[in-house]
């Protein structure tokens, strides 16, 4: 087996995806086989190694957990009985002999399709895999296994010769897939054993027809014809059919756009419109189905009670009997549905046969007129009756719309097929065919029943054979009279027969009465059963997604079919409550509204998805149109209000409340909804629109590139900048990572995702942008030039002040000062933030520990975490240095050279030790901008006009909730003899800018000489960095200056003496005036590039800002950012 060991080390990676080949669409699990070898060897893997050998027999060893010595994590792909293991590590994936399935019933998968692929990649020895449906599965896909195609790094990374150095791919990654697969083991078994899949006739057509033909057909249709007349009834049917047809088309479009799981309408809507709409409609749809159970059961009970009434066997009065019968029925149905759904599909067929027989029985009955039925109003097809029944005759305050409201539930039920989408063999073709055909057939049958009842039966009849009229009477106005009967007494009311009075008139007409009763029973019970089944199923799907906390208890399934028993009980309770209302005409409109709401949303989601123009929206059902769908959605809403305005209002309020609740809760799901697609579309369009507009001073916004390093490494910096950019301007957290040997891009992209999530979770509106660079300055240049998009580009660089500059190497200072110069070169403003305690807390708390444990899992393996700090830039806080590289690297895996300055500096690395005093102070200081600032002042030292950025930032800051108790005090320089004049001029300017301030101080003593001891301490500070060129040869001096460009020449010191003194003096003034300020905003001194050495510039900044409250050194790019013109 040694050959395999070398192959391990040398191949870029083994065959992660060699496990299965693309096979016929239906088979759940493909085994690569060479049928020619016969079944005995079919299980031996064909290992297409990169060493040019195709090993068939050498690979009988089961996948190598033994040899892996802990370097590989094993991924289990669990299917029915065997597990195929893939041992894999960062660079190498071995799948040696991973299938031991030679004679275990898998040999049947050897159709031509899998033979063509038996070497996976056209017989070439390569790890690249050919396209295979299994690569595209989601892990929990019920139809098959998930395979992993070789990752880009496996195909593309160079191979490491030393076994130790696996370029640190997070090995933990793959184990999660193994866990998922293991977790799915149970469901896979059931998927194999117990599931029955339906075709389009049995699964969709039959169900939809049964659900659409409900009670209404037999016990309300004739009454509606009596009230509205044949013409208007046909209009009602047509309107309802238009609504359902459009919805049917929309449903077909969504259902054919990808694989549909169980959960029906809820699944369709939530996966296309997102959890907000999906969640609200899921609850409402499940509730509507539960109430529908009540409606159908009440329809059934009414019929039973009528029969009892006929034989005088009532228990109490009619209404209570309906309640009693309904309760018993629903208990029976619950028992049936809980017992199991195996026979349900067969029962549906039986019920359909009974139903069809009943309908035919009625039509046959219409053509056999019988003498005995005439007094009750049935005469067979007569033109006179048809003419009379053509026009409406509304009674008891009924109207066209109330008729429509009562009829409409008879048209609903078109989602019955889609609701069991999980149980169809091919939902993509079944749902469109079945649903649309069902709508057509039922629509035609309704019209036929309307015309025939309207042509055969009188509106009113007494049922008394003696009420005849002599044909001789000339004043015959109604059809009854011409047919020889006189039913005029019915005008007063009290008649029991005819279209208007007898709900059971269809059984009177039919050839064999009891068959109609059987039809009613079958129609009601089948619909009730379907609703009783689909409500818990939809509800279970909703609870599984865990959108509403607390409902998760209902997600639990029992038994091998994963039956939602708890959901059944809940549905039963809701149904029972509505059965006790016992009034069909009250229940019907409520349900109609709920169903209409879901139809409206299905239509809307098709419109929305087409509008969002997302590449993922490509339904295989082509006959939909976004505008028709929109019209459908509007129609549904209109119909809701027509049917019952108060119920519609209630429904809308409920949907809205649930929508608001879910969008506020923001469940942790990502279904690729069209809402996301639309947001992207709008963002893109608006970014482009924005680019077309020239910037205007009024619209200037500070767009900050903040050098934070890891976003949680410098909380103070982050919170302060967030305070003045939140909802105002762009904020980008830049992070320069310097790699010691080879950049680990995979880790960087993982970190990118984690930290962006961390920012969102902490409600910080910022983007995190890490880059790899040779050093800090290059990284900063990349960020300054490339960050942003069109107008959304940073215009201000924000950095922390380099507190520890004098301890580290001077080349870091040179780099730091050069970043400032680069920013000015690129026309950016610059803001430096200095806290006396420092900013960087990452040495106290490792950046990862600040992420929650759940976040940590994603990052893969992080056992030995060391920050690699280049050249000692990092110490308890070099704000920008962080940027360098706290790069977490599993040390053993990488063999990197780690220079950890922190340990040398303080000797503290472990966070287990109690914190030192300085660290405690640092942690307190780092959180100070997070909390609300109490009363205090923000002191603005606006000494030089930089365009107004130094004034704009404090203004934006004090506008925020946390800072609103702070007042702005303004300090400006001036001449002693005209202090009042300067103050008035400044006040006038500020009032023109409309910026509130509490006081203006004009400092006349800026140019007085600083105190002696301060000048001395400054000279002491710069002593080590002097060039001292007067003490040496000119050549030596030039050479030294070239090698160490930061050195300060005596000439330069002399030249800038006044400026130096000013910084020292300003620091004295700051201590005098602003020692108790919450925040100081100060104009930053500029240094000419090339003329002032970086050590001198750094010393100025240090001198100016030392021993003060938090201070911002601000310098805009000398262009106005404030204007007083409207």
Image (tube, rainbow, N blue to C red):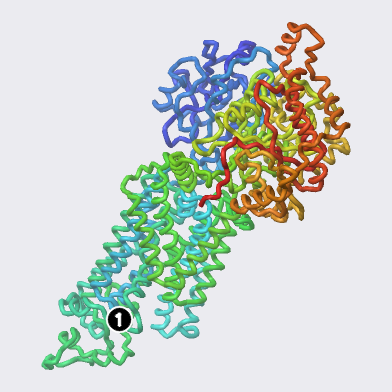
The answer to which quarter of the image holds residue 150 is: top right
Identify which residue is drawn at 32% across, 54% down: 628
Under circle 1, the secondary element is loop
Tell me if mark 1 has few (under 14), some (14-19) or many (20+) residues whose alpha carbon lies within 10 angstroms of its own: some
Q: Position of residue 928 (x, y in %)?
A: 76, 46
Let me know if residue 176 appears in the view: no
Question: Is 26 positioned to the left or the right of 548 in the image?
Answer: left
Quarter residue 783 falls in: top right
**Disc 1 designates what residue?**
394
In the image: residue 990, left or right of residue 488? right
Query: What is the quadrant of residue 1006 in the picture?
Result: top right
In the visual, does 237 lie left or right of 560?
Answer: left
Q: Nearer the viewer, residue 477 or 1088?
A: 1088
All told, the count of numbered labels is 1
Up-down relation of residue 635 to residue 429 (above or below): below
The answer to whether residue 135 shows anywhere in this view is: yes
- Residue at coordinates 79% horizontally, 18% vertically from top-left? 1026
């Amino acid at each position: 087996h040694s050959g395999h060991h070398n192959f391990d080390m040398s191949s870029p990676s083994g065959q992660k995806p060699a496990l299965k080949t693309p096979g016929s669409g239906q088979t759940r699990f493909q085994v690569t086989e060479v049928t020619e070898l016969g079944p005995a060897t079919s299980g031996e893997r064909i290992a297409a190694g990169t060493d040019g050998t195709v090993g068939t027999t050498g690979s009988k060893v089961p996948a190598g957990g033994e040899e892996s010595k802990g370097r590989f994590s094993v991924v289990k792909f669990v299917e029915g009985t065997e597990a195929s293991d893939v041992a894999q590590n960062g660079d190498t994936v071995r799948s040696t002999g991973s299938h031991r399935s030679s004679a275990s019933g898998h040999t049947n998968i050897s159709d031509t399709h899998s033979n063509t692929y038996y070497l996976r990649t056209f017989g070439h020895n390569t790890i690249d895999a050919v396209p295979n449906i299994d690569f595209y599965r989601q892990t929990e896909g019920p139809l098959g296994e998930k395979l992993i195609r070789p990752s880009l790094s496996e195909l593309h990374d160079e191979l490491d010769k030393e076994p130790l150095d696996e370029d640190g791919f997070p090995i933990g990654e793959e184990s999660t897939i193994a866990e998922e697969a293991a977790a799915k083991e149970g469901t896979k078994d059931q998927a194999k054993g117990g599931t029955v899949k339906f075709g389009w006739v049995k699964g969709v057509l039959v169900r939809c027809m049964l659900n659409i033909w409900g009670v209404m057909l037999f016990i309300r249709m004739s009454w509606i014809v009596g009230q509205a007349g044949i013409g208007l009834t046909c209009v009602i049917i047509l309107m309802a059919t238009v609504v359902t047809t459009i919805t049917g088309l929309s449903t077909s479009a969504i259902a054919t756009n990808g694989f549909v799981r169980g959960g029906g309408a809820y699944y369709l809507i939530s996966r296309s419109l997102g959890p907000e709409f999906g969640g609200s409609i899921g609850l409402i749809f499940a509730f509507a189905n539960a109430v529908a159970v009540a409606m159908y059961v009440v329809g059934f009970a009414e019929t039973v009670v009528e029969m009892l009434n006929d034989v005088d066997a009532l228990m109490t009065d009619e209404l209570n009997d309906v309640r009693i019968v309904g309760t018993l029925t629903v208990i029976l149905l619950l028992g049936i549905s809980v017992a199991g759904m195996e026979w349900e599909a067969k029962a549906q067929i039986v019920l359909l046969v009974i139903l069809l027989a009943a309908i035919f029985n009625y039509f046959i009955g219409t053509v056999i007129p019988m003498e005995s039925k005439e007094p009750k109003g049935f005469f067979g097809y007569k033109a006179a009756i048809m003419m009379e029944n053509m026009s409406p005759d509304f009674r008891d305050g009924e109207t066209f719309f109330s008729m429509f409201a009562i009829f409409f539930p008879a048209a609903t039920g078109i989602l019955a097929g889609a609701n069991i989408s999980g149980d169809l063999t091919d939902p993509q073709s079944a749902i469109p065919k079945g649903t649309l055909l069902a709508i057509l057939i039922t629509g035609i049958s309704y019209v036929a029943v309307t015309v025939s009842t309207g042509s055969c039966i009188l509106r009113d009849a007494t049922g008394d054979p003696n009420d005849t009229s002599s044909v001789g009477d000339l004043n015959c106005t109604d059809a009854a009279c011409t047919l020889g009967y006189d039913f005029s007494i019915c005008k007063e009311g009290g008649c029991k027969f005819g279209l208007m009075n007898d709900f059971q008139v269809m059984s009177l007409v039919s050839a064999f009465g009891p068959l109609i009763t059987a039809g009613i029973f079958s129609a009601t019970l089948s619909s009730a059963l379907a609703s009783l089944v689909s409500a818990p199923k939809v509800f279970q799907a909703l609870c599984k997604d865990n959108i509403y906390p607390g409902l998760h208890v209902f997600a639990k399934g029992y038994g091998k079919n994963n039956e939602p028993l708890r959901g059944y009980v809940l549905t039963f309770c809701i149904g029972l409550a509505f059965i006790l209302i016992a009034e069909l005409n009250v229940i019907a409109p409520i349900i109609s509204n709920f169903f209409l709401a879901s139809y409206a949303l299905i239509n809307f989601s098709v419109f929305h998805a087409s509008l969002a123009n997302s590449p993922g929206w490509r339904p295989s059902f082509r006959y939909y149109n976004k505008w028709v769908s929109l019209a459908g959605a509007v129609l549904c809403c209109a119909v809701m209000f027509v049917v019952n305005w108060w119920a519609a209002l209630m429904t809308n309020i409920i949907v809205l409340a649930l929508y608001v609740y879910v969008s506020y809760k923001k469940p942790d799901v990502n279904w690729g909804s069209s809402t996301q697609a639309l947001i992207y579309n709008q963002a893109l369009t608006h970014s482009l629109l924005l680019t077309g507009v020239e910037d205007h001073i009024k619209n200037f916004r500070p767009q900050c590139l903040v050098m934070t390093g890891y976003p949680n490494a410098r909380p103070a910096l982050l919170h302060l900048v967030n305070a003045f950019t939140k909802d105002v301007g762009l904020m980008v957290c830049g992070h320069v990572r310097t790699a010691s040997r080879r950049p680990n891009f995979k880790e960087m992209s993982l970190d990118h995702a984690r930290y962006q999530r961390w920012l969102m979770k902490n409600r910080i509106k910022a983007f995190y942008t890490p880059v790899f660079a040779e050093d800090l300055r290059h990284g900063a240049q990349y960020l300054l030039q490339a960050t942003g998009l069109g107008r959304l580009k940073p215009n201000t660089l924000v950095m922390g002040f380099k507190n520890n500059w004098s301890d580290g190497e001077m080349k870091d200072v040179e780099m730091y000062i050069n970043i400032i110069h680069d920013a000015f070169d690129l026309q950016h403003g610059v803001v430096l933030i200095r806290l006396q305690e420092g900013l960087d807390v990452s040495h106290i708390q490792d950046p990862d520990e600040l992420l929650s444990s759940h976040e940590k899992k994603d990052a893969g393996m992080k056992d030995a975490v060391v920050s690699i700090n280049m050249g000692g830039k990092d110490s308890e806080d070099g704000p920008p240095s962080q940027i360098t590289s706290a790069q977490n690297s599993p040390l053993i895996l990488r063999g990197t050279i780690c220079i950890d300055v922190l340990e040398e500096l303080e000797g503290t690395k472990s966070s287990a030790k109690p914190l030192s005093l300085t660290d405690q102070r640092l942690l307190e200081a780092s959180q100070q901008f997070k909390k609300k600032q109490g009363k205090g002042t923000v002191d603005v030292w606006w000494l030089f006009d930089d365009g107004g950025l130094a004034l704009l930032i404090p203004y934006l800051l004090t506008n925020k909730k946390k800072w609103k108790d702070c007042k702005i005090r303004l300090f400006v320089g001036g001449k002693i003899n005209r202090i009042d004049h300067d103050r008035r001029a400044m006040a006038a300017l500020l009032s023109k800018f409309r910026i509130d301030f509490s006081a203006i101080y004009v400092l006349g003593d800026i140019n007085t000489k600083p105190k002696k001891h301060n000048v001395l301490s400054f000279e002491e500070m710069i002593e080590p960095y002097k060039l001292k060129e007067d003490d040496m040869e000119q050549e030596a001096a030039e050479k030294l200056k070239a090698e160490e460009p930061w050195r300060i020449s005596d000439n330069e010191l002399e030249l800038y003496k006044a400026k130096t003194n000013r910084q020292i003096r300003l620091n004295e003034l700051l201590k005098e005036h602003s020692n108790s300020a919450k925040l100081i905003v100060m104009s930053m001194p500029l240094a000419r590039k090339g003329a002032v050495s970086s050590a001198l510039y750094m010393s100025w900044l240090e001198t100016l800002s030392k021993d003060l409250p938090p201070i911002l050194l601000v310098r805009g790019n000398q262009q106005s950012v404030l204007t007083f013109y409207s």
